[in-house]
Image (spheres, rainbow, N blue to C red):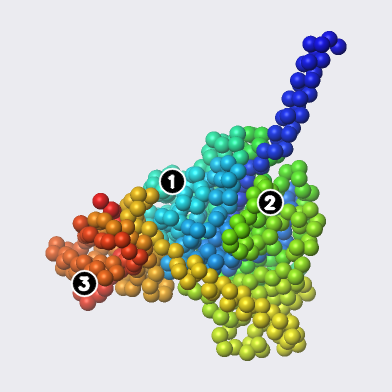
Amino acid sequence: MTPYTRLVSIFLTFLILHTNVFSQNTPPNIILVITDDQGYGDFGFTGNPHISTPTLDQLAQESVEFTNFYVSPVCAPTRSSLMTGRYSLRTGIRDTYNGGAMMSTEEITIAELLKKKHYVTGIFGKWHLGDNFPMRPSDQGFDESLIHLSGGMGQVGDFTTYYQGNRSYFDPVLWHNNQQQSYQGYCSDIFTEEAIKFIENNKDQPFFTYLSFNAPHTPLQVPDEYYQKYKDLDPSEGFGEDGKPFYPMSESQKEDARKVYAMVENIDDNLNKLFSKLEELEIDDRTIIIFLTDNGPQQQRYVSGLRGLKGNVFQGGVRAPLLIHYPEKYQRSKKIDQLTAHLDILPTIAEVVGIDLPNDRKIDGKSLIPLMNGDASNFQNRSFFSYWNRKYPERYNNISIQNSGWKLVGKTDYQAPLEDFELYNLTEDPYEQTNLISTKTSKGRELKIEMDEFYEELIQEKHLVNQPLIQVGFEEENPVFLNRNDAAGQRGIWAQEEIYGYWNVLLASGTYDFTFKFVKDVPSQGTMYLETGPIVNQTKIESEGEVEFIEMKDIQLPEMKTQIIPFYQVNGKQIFPFWVEIHKK
């Protein structure tokens, strides 16, 4: 070998070694996929013979599957815990509307953590943790965001799709980087297509893609080509022979199931497009895929024998699938049965990419990496607390705690004695059929003590006591649109006309124009009132006929934390606006 060829050989060897080191030190891409109201039984791999989910079934065969994984009973609490690794009440999230679905801007999200490692971050679909500054995805670590507002398209908070009625999932106006933008097509297709574009544009650097489908949440709208595959299906047939409970379905529930299955198959097809794109870009081997759902099904259908639906602390409301596909790192088709939860996703991602967890707050989750490596020591004697009620949690009403295979459920009131609770041995009775509270009283008492400790701690969390505020009049968002999802006040604010409501805000000093839109046109010859703390303004509407909008211009307001309370008084009624636009001059 000549000196020249020896030098070339040394250089090539160095280059190969350097390339391998660089490859090993480059953090993996991360894709987090979550679906909305897709129950534990809405998959082929969980035993449903009627639904077509080949892509997800294959993913389950190529992933670590966590078979004892839990989420919250409803949407926003699950998403806040997923993003922060903390129980939702710590983050300020206490409801899905009623002004309770706004997460404190002080929370640190997965996206914000990953920015420390120079990830580019994008969200596509449902956020449901606050629609205004400083709670939007762009305020919480996401470089690109394409979302609908509030809890769902076609819902009152998402006023850009609400009036489209039975077409709200088609050709929607969405919010791209906080600006309204029109799109063509079906929502799940749009979110996937835009996620793929984001991945294509960022394939040469680490990326975090949060693909958060709003399907199969109501309204149950789906392209007809998918519905036609299920229109003649009886979704109640073929169950019960395996010994799992199957709860009766009404005819309307059967029709809902057909639509849900069609929506799920569409999601599965979209995930096939996404995963195929990873292969085409040759980045599939360095991309982690995490898949889960946010809670149980809203409508009665096959739930793999589990009891309860969305909103319920029984297993059918809170047990969900979790798949983690980590190429060339962990054994394929491996199943783990330790108690795990949505709280664990942020700590897991942090360990994968080598980021320290925040040390100035309590992180309730645990990294799943030790479990995936065969070490379950950190998960022994673990407890998981769950609750759900409108507005705020109620002591002993739809509340549960589980530990070491035992689960205590409260479906009673704050003064209830222990015998009014329900106790289940999930190891022997995973379908919660046999209440053991009368025979295992000491175990029930032990769990109730822990339930009380959880409740007392969480109910005093600072972000729950001092709710997050929408910031109005700041340069980060002007104009501001206040929607019904984030309106507090009377319980159950939705699409009612006569209801008392308001928005909690931090108001910058300045001169403002207000525009009020109502659920439907209102009669003229009334008076519009705007209360902002101690300052009250009113204007009389003198025009003839009905009006769609009412404007109040040049209102001077000081800086303050306050409630914005608008109402239109006419013909003996006080009508609350559907949404409010506020523009600071």
Q: Does residue 21 appear anywhere in the picture?
A: yes
Return the x and y of residue 387 as percentages of the image width and height.
58, 73
- In which quadrant is the N terminus drawn? top right
Q: Is residue 572 above or below residue 181?
A: below
The tag on residue 151 is none
Q: Is residue 318 above or below residue 15?
A: below
Determine the image quadrant of residue 468.
bottom left
Q: Earlier in the sequence, mark 3 or mark 2?
A: 2
Return the x and y of residue 416 as percentages of the image width and height.
59, 88
Q: Earlier in the sequence, mark 1 or mark 3?
A: 1
**What SS does tag 1 mark?**
loop
CA gap between label 3 and label 2 equals: 59 Å
- Badge 2 is on which residue? 351
The tag on residue 177 is 1
Return the x and y of residue 548 as percentages of the image width and height.
25, 60
Q: State the residue at coordinates (45%, 67%).
A: 467
Q: Residues within 10 Å of mark 2 (few under 14, many from 20)?
A: some
Q: Residues within 10 Å of mark 1 (few under 14, many from 20)?
A: some
- Badge 3 is on which residue? 570
Q: State the residue at coordinates (14%, 62%).
A: 543
User: Which of the two discs, 2 and 1, sits closer to the camera?
Assistant: 2
CA gap between label 2 and label 1 equals: 29 Å
Q: State the residue at coordinates (61%, 71%).
A: 386
Q: Earlier in the sequence, mark 2 or mark 1?
A: 1
Residue found at the very far front of the displayed protein? 360
Marks 1 & 3, CB-CB < 8 Å contact: no
Q: Amino acid at mark 2?
A: Glu
Marks 3 & 2, CB-CB < 8 Å contact: no
Q: Amino acid at mark 1?
A: Asn
Q: Amino acid at mark 3?
A: Val
| Pick the front one: 541 or 297 | 541
